[in-house]
Image: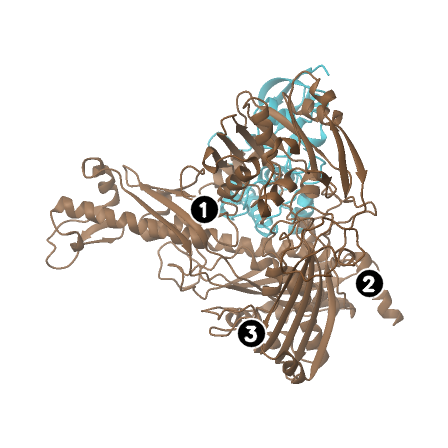
Chain colours: A cyan, B brown
Amino acid sequence: MSKIHVSAVVNGDPVDFLADPRESLLDCLRDQLGLTGSKEGCGTGDCGACSVTVDGVLVCSCLVLGVEAEGKAIGTVEGLSDGGTLHPLQRKFIEHAALQCGFCTPGILVAAKALLDQNASPTETEVRYWLAGNLCRCTGYDKIVRAVMDAASEMREAV
Amino acid sequence: MAKDEIKSEYRLIGTRPNRPDGLDKVTGRARYGADMTLPGMLFAAVVRSPHAHARILKIDASAALALDGVKAVVTRADFPTGLTGEDWNLQENSMAGDVALYDGHAVAAVAATSRLLAEDAAKLIKIDYEVLPHVIDVDDAIRPDAPVVRVGAADHTVPAGSPPNVVKCLDFGHGDIEAGFSAADLVREHTYKTEATHQGYIEPHACVAQLGADGKGEMWVCTQGQWYIRRMCAAVLGIDASGLRVTPSEIGGGFGGKTIIFMEPLALALSRKAGGRPVKLVMSRSDVLRATGPTASASMDVKLGMTKDGKLTAAKVNFRMQGGAFLGASPVGEALSCALACYDIPAVQHDGVEVLANRPKAAAYRAPGSPMAAFAVESLLDEMCHELGLDPLDVRLKNAVREGVKASYGPTYAKIGLVEVLEATKAHPNLLAPLGPNQGRGIASGFWFNHGGETSVSLAIGEDGTVTVSAGTPDIGGSRASLALMVAETLGIEYEAVRVNIVETGALGVNEPSHGSRATFATGKAAVEAARHAMAEMCRRAAKEWGIEEEAVVWKDGAAMPAGPNAGKFPPMSIAEIGAKMGGNGGPISGHHETNADGVGASFGAHVVDVEVDPETGRTTILRYLVVQDAGRAIHPAYVEGQYQGGAVQGIGWALNEEYVYGANGRLQNAVFLDYRIPVASDLPMIDTVIVEVPNPGHPYGVRGVGETGITPPLPAIANAVAMATGARIRSLPLSPPKVLAAIKAKGRG
């Protein structure tokens, strides 16, 4: 199948790649653009390890075709930190030991940032339901939820 | 970094610094199994049996091979013959021989220049099958007239005339069992069942493998144990172990399921056949669920005798487990050994059989065998406490094992902490929370042996006095941090001055995997010894520099210093000064230690769960959850809590949702995460933890190991809580809403 030329913006940088029409956005990010921070845990949109934003909307990149990225702005875990400065979520995840194996972490960070972008003061229940599409098998979610709440609190104080 | 409230004589042990690999893991930089790319790399796809049991009549790969860009196809014919025992099991599970033994069993594999091309080519490989009768359920498999999974698979323990799928029999015990039951005021006996579950690590198995015609190769792979992978692949492929260099990637969870090989030999065989080009093989989630893991399913009889004041007098357990189509894959031995390990019972008898079924080869899953056994024993114990009007926590305390007691499985316990765990549980405020209608509280204890095992660690002093540790146990949950803490504590230097690398197979002697809750215990113990080894050498260097006897130099606070009045007066020589001078003063300084680590300290825990059961739907909600466990010593308490919480939640999934569902055709019906439903954040409350510390005298800092015990109590604790909430006792898992609803309705009719 002939490939299609795709132009997009990823984490603020313009990119071009050739996508097989069958390839997911996740495959294109990982295999064409070398952005392996987004992970494939299921390929069926159930685990959230591939979470990215497309024009600010949180999606599972395994359920989006690479060709659909044409003209879109994509945000991945690699774009969370600002140069050498970690996003508060990244820092709080380390401080709270909110990761064990770390494989689900990129997707959870992207999803949590999407939550805080629209809700600066989520309740514990809101965090838990927002992250219900992000599977973690190691932590039991306790420290993840605490890290997100703590990051939100710090970000509110910083405003 | 604030120290925890626990009083400690240590400077660093017990603090909670940031993990050294944290930055890589929150930025997406950490490289896992599927994140590796090599020049000239091919991509592989695997063809799997759609049948639970089928003779493979013919494999025709000609159409696949005719595609441009397809470089190799392998079948079992590309592997050596004549393997025996577990080597044969591993080879057979990696790639079917004459017969596909389960749905998802690999039959052929193909390598091509792109992933999509490999997947297209796999669809063109034509396989003719003769479908054979199959058997899935453990109780069905043990019937004398069951379809035979494999003829002649039984070992010497099976008496003649046993049902055809019984492949192993075990029995052990001590004490006068009949006298024990005679001394009881209440004797009860029930049968319990648990379904197979999967470890459910979020990272699918993945590797990049390269193997030349000369038998030399290398592999990048997500694994809990690079040396195990090397040995197993070498055996399956007929190459020398030392010819294969295995580098562990970061690992996206394992829980026991990444201690053995699955598709790795296929990638190596494809590479060999494709002229030595590297081959990447990444499993899909469905492949992971169909053909890796899972744990065994179990059918278990338990009989207990108890006096009216709650003393256990005798116990008899009889377990039947299937671990797939392969002898030795089920953890029936561990299940029997763990079943009664929490209690001091005068007479115990254990009997068990392993049965073959048309399922994948079971792999270890966190405290293998113990959760099922605990479900059976702790459920019955709870029932009897309620029948006699006794407090279930007091009864557990009354029967708890202590130092010097002969364990149900044979040895005599050294220093253990079950009593301390149960007392801490009793004191926890969660036990005072009031319960409302349809709510119940369940309690259970749990046990795991913990493990030492083959361990080799090296440590090198840098020219600036910083330290590099080479460890062989992959870091699944913060072990780099715990190892750095122990080494820094021992050397008297800062935590940040120690870098821990997880190294490839060429860099150290054989290490067992990160399994058995051993990484912080055994690798930690060896790392401390390696540090002491380097300290002794640094003292020698200082003695040489000062021109005094080396016995007159001691190591203190990160520096060599003269000891005693006759040593002379010299200022302390820091590790940085020694490192800077070592080139001209004797050469490189390193420490090394290798051992088959002894001094293992057994692990006990207790969990308390409050649930609410919706009487309309049968759905169980976890309201409160408490884990209390003896860590021996918590090196990094945050990651100890993480192990407790993660184990508890895997157990919650096993208790409430997770099970392998097979259709009448023997095919797995729920091979995606939507249908194999592991707990999500919105299912759960915070998981409260209490770290009890009864130091293990067999470890320099008292470590026992914390990974596994936590998955054991949730199964019975939740079943006990649901029984209290509903008045209905359910003796099979999972406690899915339809099952709970049916039990509530049956009780109403009764």
Q: Which residue is mark 2?
A: B615
Q: Residue at x 48, y 29 (%)?
A: B216
Tell me the quadrant of the picture where the C terminus of chain B can be found.
bottom right
Label 1, label 2: how many angstroms apart (C-alpha)?
Answer: 51 Å
Mark 2 and mark 3 in contact? Answer it, CB < 8 Å: no
Residue B91 occupies which quadrant of the picture? top right
Write down the chain letter for disc 2: B
Residue mark closest to the camera, 1 vs 2 = 1
Label 3: chain? Answer: B
Residue B10 visible to an observer of this rendering: yes
Q: Amino acid at mark 1?
A: Asn
Number of residues whose C-alpha sits closer than 10 Å to that of mark 1, classed few (under 14), some (14–19) or many (20 or more): many
**Residue B511 image label:** 1
Q: Which mark is residue B400?
A: 3
Question: Nearer the N terminus, badge 1 or badge 3?
Answer: 3
Q: Secondary structure at mark 3?
A: loop
Nearer to me, B193 or B317: B317
